[in-house]
Image (spheres, grey):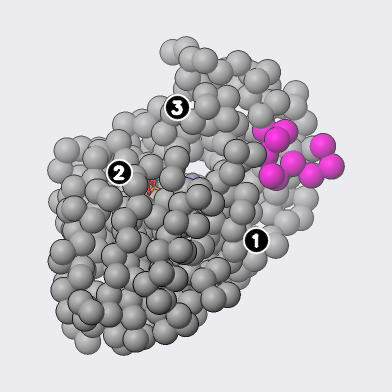
Amino acid sequence: MSAATSPLELGLPYPVVVARGVLGSLFELVSQHAPNHRYAFIVDEHVQRLHAPGALRGFPAERTLTLTVPSGEAYKTREEWQRLSDGLLAWGAGRDTTIIAMGGGVTGDLGGFVAATLHRGVPVVQVPTTLLAMVDSSVGGKTGVDTPAGKNLIGAFHDPSLVVADVDVLRTLPPDVRADGLAEMIKHGLIADADVFTELCGLLPDLAGARGAEVESLPDLVARSVAIKAHVVRQDAREAGLRQILNAGHTIAHAIEHVLNFSLSHGSAVAIGLVAEARLAERLGVAEAGLADTVADAVRRAGLPDRLPDGTTDQALVEATRSDKKARGGVVRYALMERVGRMSRGDGGWSLGVGDGDVMGVLGGMRGG
Ligand SMILES: NC(=O)c1ccc[n+]([C@@H]2O[C@H](COP(=O)([O-])OP(=O)(O)OC[C@H]3O[C@@H](n4cnc5c(N)ncnc54)[C@H](O)[C@@H]3O)[C@@H](O)[C@H]2O)c1
Ligand SMILES: [Zn+2]
């Protein structure tokens, strides 16, 4: 196998390939790691137009189906799961079918859930095409759909058989969508690897710029960011403990998204959430002084916000944190940073129950400026 198609050494039960131009070798990789009689692509509509022709090369036309998913979170639904599942069944898809989910996190979660449930589970290959999907959602096996009651409430753990990330496809990704991925990369450095964080910080202005996808070390940075996620999910596949650290910044981020009715991008919400939760960790004496300023500096370098947006009140945000899945017995639990590259174990389970007063104290200082 050529160097470009060699999987990373991640210790996961499935291979993950990250390289420029690797989409042209997709059939070769799928034949090797998830061979089957039939292949069904579930593809985001934009990705279909931009990148599917190259990816489909080599797949046997008479045994390959392509189903397109409309772009956007609004389509990560049970209705779309049903439409796709029915389409596959009408085509005759049996256990002899490998599904290839190609797109951002929406397509990955939806296509993965279709694969998890079709005939009680068929193999899925994840082909992430957004930066966020490459470094975050394609690895870890979480699949699912949203419901009117909330996001990701119906789903299943279903590991992919293979993950193929072609960094070249990021050239067509709009910069604001790329920024969502940068926020998660900042998070990964913060929670587990100070070297990754430092290197990333130096490159953030370039990565966030118009030619960000051209940055030479991007494949390496993506690979190291995936490795951090892999390291965590390998030790805690079912979110029993350590996986909590991946929620860094996300308790506040989810509250902001909720209060603003998802009008702010996830990456922007995560950026603000990371800063807020770093300030919270400092306030509680969990983190060393100066951490929050370091985090704020990083998110600003990525062109992401570090202050609370208009349209949110402290009261509304605190109330929103209470509806988060992570609230236990009425106390909201936070995964808190100790310093760059290291998370706190909290009071067990890598999280800490925090009173509303402390959260209010932090939020109050994060407006204006
Ligand atoms: N399963 C997990 O562990 C996990 C983790 C984090 C996030 N998620 C989920 O991921 C989703 C967000 O994923 P996302 O940020 O990738 O959003 P997304 O899938 O909605 O994609 C964002 C936009 O980018 C477009 N796009 C994708 N690839 C492109 C490319 N190469 N060129 C041009 N346009 C392209 C899409 O059409 C879409 O408009 C959320 O639903 C979230 O819940 C899941
Ligand atoms: Zn996130």
Q: Where is residue 10 in the image (x, y as percent from the top left)?
A: 43, 74
According to the picture, the residue beneath numbered tag 2 turns out to be 178
Query: Cα distance, mark 2 to mark 1?
Result: 27 Å
Q: Which of 56 and 140 is in front in this view?
A: 56
Indicate if the residue with disc 3 has its beta carbon within 8 Å of ligand 1: no
- Residue type for callout 1: Glu
Q: Quadrant of residue 107?
A: bottom left
Indicate if the residue with disc 2 has its beta carbon within 8 Å of ligand 1: no
Q: What stretch is highlighted in magenta?
A: 321-330
Query: Cα distance, mark 3 to mark 2?
Result: 17 Å
Residue 328 in magenta stretch: yes
Left or right position of 85 against 52: right
The answer to whether residue 236 is visible is: yes
Query: Cα distance, mark 1 to mark 3?
Result: 28 Å
Give the mark nearer the N terminus: 2 vs 1.
2
Q: Position of residue 191 (x, y in %)?
A: 52, 52
Q: Position of residue 201 (x, y in %)?
A: 33, 44
Q: Name which residue lies at 38% across and 42% down.
A: 72
Quarter of the rendering occupied by the C terminus: top left
Local packing at callout 2 (Cα closer than 10 Å; few below 14, some 14-19, many 20+) is: many
Quarter of the rendering occupied by the N terminus: bottom left
SS type, badge 2: helix
SS type, badge 3: loop
According to the picture, the residue beneath numbered tag 1 turns out to be 239
* Residue at the extreme right: 329
Tag shown at residue 158: none
Residue 6 in magenta stretch: no
According to the picture, the residue beneath numbered tag 3 turns out to be 263
Give the mark nearer the N terminus: 3 vs 2.
2
- Residue type for callout 3: Ser
Mark 1 touches mark 3? (CB < 8 Å): no
